[in-house]
Image: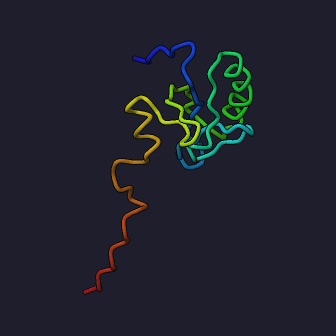
């Protein structure tokens, strides 16, 4: 069940890049970034509403999927930090070694 966001809570917009599934965040310049500390943090509904048309256009253009607005703790020096466990894991990266990260085993000599 989704958590209800507090009206005054700092928030960021996150999604997954469609081409490779990487977690991305909406930056202040309207681009998508993989760096959480570059995500634009908003604290009011009008600013969030102003960001949504560009985000939705990127969804429709098949650049990103799974658009979500998440609450964060915001430290102006360190940047945003996700509050929820799901977003904390997404920000830190996979919790397992992905097949592409594993070394390729040496070929066995043919008998």
Quadrant the N terminus occupies = top left
Q: How many marks?
A: 0
Q: Quadrant of residue 39?
A: top right
Query: Looking at the image, which residue is at 70% across and 19% down?
Result: 49
Residue 51, image x and y in percent?
71, 26
Image quarter for residue 2? top left
Question: Residue 34: x and y, percent?
Answer: 58, 47
Along the line of sight, the residue nearer the viewer: 108 or 81 = 81
Would residue 92 be found to the left or right of residue 70 on screen? Answer: left
The x and y percentages for residue 4 are: 47, 14
Compared with residue 97, is residue 8 higher up or lower down, i.e. above or below?
above
- Please give the name of the residue rendered at 55% of the width and 49% of the height, measured from the top-left corner: 20
Q: Is residue 10 above or below residue 75?
A: above
The colouring scheme, among rainbow, by chain, secondary structure or one colour, is rainbow
Farthest front residue in view: 77
Whole-percent x, y for residue 95 in the image: 35, 48
Q: Quadrant of the C terminus?
A: bottom left
Q: Quadrant of residue 43?
A: top right
Residue closer to the observer: 59 or 40? 40
Q: Residue 8 or 55: which is nearer the viewer?
A: 8
Is residue 7 rendered to the left or right of residue 30? left
59 over 19 or under it: above or below: above
Q: What residue is drawn where x is 48% and y is 36%?
A: 81
């Amino acid at each position: 069940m989704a958590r209800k966001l507090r009206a005054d809570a700092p928030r960021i917009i996150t999604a997954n890049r469609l081409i490779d599934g990487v977690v991305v965040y909406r930056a202040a310049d309207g681009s998508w970034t993989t760096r959480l500390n570059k995500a634009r943090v908003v604290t009011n509904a009008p600013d969030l509403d102003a960001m949504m048309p560009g985000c939705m256009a990127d969804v429709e253009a098949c650049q990103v999927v799974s658009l979500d607005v998440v609450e964060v703790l915001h430290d102006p020096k360190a940047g945003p930090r996700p509050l929820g466990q799901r977003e904390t894991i997404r920000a830190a990266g996979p919790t397992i070694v992905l097949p592409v990260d594993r070394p390729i085993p040496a070929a066995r000599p043919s008998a």
